[in-house]
Amino acid sequence: MRFSTPLVAGLAVVSPATAAPKPSYGDKELFKTVKPIKQIELGPRPYYLVNDMDEGSLKKKLQSCSEKPQKPSKWSIAHRGGATLQIPEHSLESNLAGARMGAGVLECDVAFTKDRELVCRHSQCDLHYTTNIVTIPELNKKCTQPFKPAKDGKPASAKCCTSDITLKEYKTLCAKMEGFNATATNAADFLKGTPSWRTDIYSTCGTVMSNKEHIQLVKRLGLKHTPELKTPEVKMPFDGDYTQEKYAQQLIDEHKEAGVKPSDVYLQSFLYDDILYWLEAEPEYARQAMYLDETGDTPETFKTAVANLTRYAQDGVRYIAPPLPYLVQAGKDGKIVPSAYAKKAKELGLKIVTWSLERSPPLKNAATNGDYYYSTIAKIVNNDGDVFKLLDVFREIGVVGVFSDWSATVTYYANCFGLGLQFPPTNGISHYFDAALYNTCELIALIFTTFKHRHGLYFWSLLITTLGLLPYAIGWLLGYLDLANGYLCKVLASIGWIVLISGQSVVMYSRLHLVLNNFRIQRAVLWMIVVNGTVWHTTQTVMLFTIGPGGNGDNPAPLFIAIEKTQMTFFCAQELVISGLYLWGAIDILKTSLGNNNRKIMWQLLIINMLIVAMDVALLVIVYMGYYTTERGLKLVIYSVKLKLEFAVLGKLVDVSRSRGASDVSGTNGFIEVSSRQRRGQTHSETQALPKIVHVEDNSYSTQRMVYEGGDNKGNDKVGSTRHLYDDAIKQISTG
């Protein structure tokens, strides 16, 4: 994003007169050959950088990832195409190389032409040092300042802007490596200015692109867009009525016309007024707009830049994008540490993107060269491998994306640490859906083959909760794959989630009386479920439809994430309370004179409930780690597994009941209560004397209380009472 003018002549670029014919991109023929890249290739550079690192744990970690298959990552943002270190910037070739190296987001810096078409150029007036325009006489003469050779001690110069020529004329240019030769006495030599640490090997005739073409390219590659609205270098309004606002709106309109979703676009601008305009005029697209902050280059202005972050957050800006040196500084121990800017942005909940990695010459000379990108840590940087130390601090800060002139470097780090990885649906996200769908079908089959009588709280809560998996799974997957309207996806997911999360608690509540004969505690648990469900489902649903993420989970607002974490904490705590009460009651039963076999079964029951608790805790950890998409998928799997564990619980309870003689169990299905038959050797009167449990609806308390009838030891013996309570409760629950 920042350009340091090279004055030293480099290797000669190929003359336009001898350049190979470039493909005609405008006729869309090339579009037919562009597809999502399945095989990510990084080349030797990341491995060279790892080997160049100082010894330590970070180096060992990165070395351990050397044979790991690579995936695209949104953490890896292709700066000016992503291969600018070796391939002409903003060329088709640079973009394809950046995508091949795993960049999940491709950049087009946008400027306008004379006929008000948008094209990809880093600056409105950089054509004289990024293309061959000065060697084309009919276009050179249209430049704001045509080429002037070096003469009488004055350097060679030119100034050619995109607004000097039309789109048709622009498309005849060849992109070249950035740079020029200030000592040139002719136009051809003026092109020779590539820095010695770059190369001209790929600089034959790069294909320049319009913004519309770039949009189509990125769509075909299946990646994200990040257009930067370049600040005009001509007086605005341009040509009478082309205002800055029209220019800013045109950028969004071209993405809209191409059918690009707001969640797939990360707008950028150095001009804060552009950000404010988008927030007002296009709030959906502005949700991910990045303010490129370059207001703190000196110690004095840096303090002001930090202070201004509060205003940006108050204005509704969600993404802040400062240059690399704003985020880090040298620590007292000689290590790279987060700066005050980074800490303040994180404190305000701003998402941080930074620029630009791999834009510097060899780092061993960073201090002597006065390199801008390493200016705050130049004294503690001594080798090229230190680039990974810098990335490691960015991860610690919570940076969500890094622009790079060589995408492979950031992609390698992102894959090693699992940052922003984009899993193809067939290889990742759909596995959650597949597992949940399978579990749901199996659960429904189990429910209808297990229960003899299909009534009662346990049966209906288990069935309805299981059915809740379907709308949640379908809504989530359709949204993630962008196969349906975003609001429809949210409605389906919301219905499913409400039924699923509160239903799970009701299922657990409906079997609590098996081990805990305390009416007040049961009533308190019921009220806890009702209050939590009412408060948090209402709050989260409102948030989802106002400031929530897109259907695919992209870009949830900080407040939404905070509410999500809070509601998940309360719901997990609710289930932990119910599980805790169940474990407490089960342990109390273990203290009775149950036989050895029953003790074994009760221990198994304890383990099952502890497993349920462990899954709740694991899900909560994922929530607090900020893996929002992963969390949504894991919810499906975890809650479907927890429902299946209900049958394991029921099976163990029936086993205890069978061993106590309360009922017989089907030999073909251990969960099916066949009937209360007379056991071998047992008299009819003994069978009739078994206690029964009857649920009586008490309208004054809106809950169930148990009335015990029959039996010779009615309440006289604590152990016997516990056994009867347990056995006959199981009998009832297993028969529906």
Image (cartoon, rainbow, N blue to C red):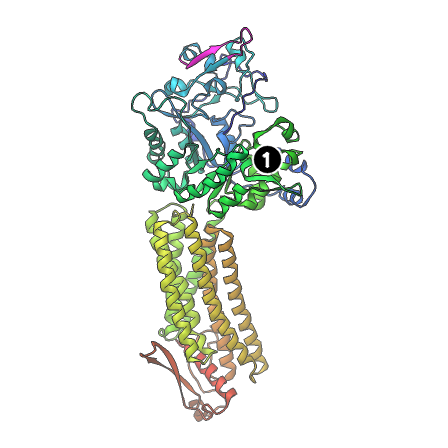
Helix, strand or loop at disc 1? loop
Instruction: Judge whether 309 appears above or below 468 on screen.
Output: above
The reply to whether residue 471 is in sight is no
Residue 515 location (% of width, % of height): 48, 78
Instruction: Judge whether 130 appears above or below 730 on screen.
Output: above
Write down the region rendered in magenta. Answer: 142-156
Residue at image point 52% right, 12% down: 156
Residue 716 location (% of width, % of height): 48, 92
Instruction: Judge whether 128 appears above or below 37 on screen.
Output: above
Residue at image point 37% right, 62% down: 535
As for residue 147 lying within the magenta part, the answer is: yes
Residue 712 location (% of width, % of height): 45, 93
Q: Amino acid at mark 1?
A: Thr
Around disc 1, counting alpha carbons within 10 Å, would you say few (fewer than 14), some (14 to 19), or many (20 or more)? some
As for residue 426 lying within the magenta part, the answer is: no
Question: Viewer-proximal residue, 528 or 303?
Answer: 303
Question: Viewer-proximal residue, 379 or 624?
Answer: 379
Question: Label 1 belongs to which residue?
Answer: 376
